[in-house]
Image (cartoon, helix red, strand yellow):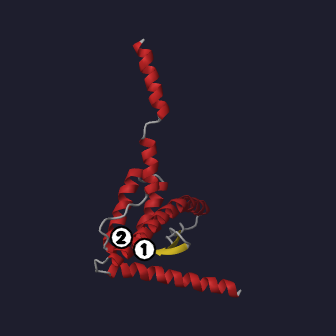
Amino acid sequence: MGLGLFKERAARKAMEEAKAAYLKATKISGVSRESHMFKTRIGARSRAHLDKVFIEGAEQATAYQELCLAAMSAGSERPQMPEPKPFQTVKSQKDIIYTYVPSEFAKEMFMLGTMYQTVAISPQEAIKMAQAVADKVSIELGLDDPFQVLQFLRDELAREDAPDDSDESNLDQKKEIDSN
């Protein structure tokens, strides 16, 4: 029992430190190398946090729809929409750390993940809208350049848009056949 309590206290302390670091980054006004590095680090953590919240929203969308259908068929009230966790964990170079972004940004990303999963918005719209949230966080943190979110979705779209090598060779074969 004591070990669980210790872990809970350590987690709670790490969450408080994550929130304090985010808030500190929003208040730093210096242009020193140290302040720039600190803001950049908090920006990278915020990017990871927003990506995870988007994924969490997408994952919970299906479960939420099933709960709504079950409630409707049972004649009961529609359940409340889940909310994102205020803290996320991400793997750093050394270990797993807690991250924090204010709830208004996390809720926006969560809803975008839900909308994307339920095909209420296209992947391109999801990227555009998620980037707008990331831009707001970047401005709040005072970053020189906004960080880019949903790189995994951008990469997936780029792979889909890239011509397949087999398509090119098939096209070359078709041109050769047509010329004969």
Horizontal arrangement in the rendering, residue 129 relative to residue 49 (left or right): left
Circles 1, 2 touching at the beta carbon (< 8 Å): yes
**Few, some or many residues within 10 Å of mark 1 (<14, 14–19, 20+):** many
Asked if one can make out residue 122 in the rendered structure from this viewpoint, the answer is no
Question: Residue at the location (55% across, 58% down)?
Answer: 62
Image coords of residue 96 (percent x, y): 55, 72
Image quarter (top left, top right, bottom left or bottom right) of the C terminus: top left
Q: Quarter-wise, where is residue 25 in the image?
A: bottom left
What number is the disc on residue 88?
none
Asked if one can make out residue 118 in the rendered structure from this viewpoint, the answer is yes
Image coords of residue 34 (percent x, y): 36, 78
Above/below status of 106 relative to 174: below
Tag 1 residue: 101
Q: How far apart are the alpha carbons under marks 1 and 2? A: 8 Å
Horizontal arrangement in the rendering, residue 104 relative to residue 85 (left or right): left
Mark closest to the chain's N terminus, 1 or 2? 1
Q: In terms of secondary structure, where does tag 1 sit? A: loop
Image coords of residue 69 (percent x, y): 57, 59
Q: In terms of secondary structure, where does tag 2 sit? A: helix
Q: Amino acid at mark 2?
A: Val
Query: Nearest the camera: 11 or 110?
Result: 11
**Few, some or many residues within 10 Å of mark 2 (<14, 14–19, 20+):** many
Q: Quarter-wise, where is residue 77 in the image?
A: bottom right
Above/below status of 32 relative to 173: below
Question: Residue at the location (36% across, 60% down)?
Answer: 131
Image coords of residue 110 (percent x, y): 46, 65
Q: Residue furthest bottom?
A: 2
Tag 2 residue: 137
Q: Amino acid at mark 1?
A: Val
Query: Nearest the camera: 56 or 92?
Result: 92
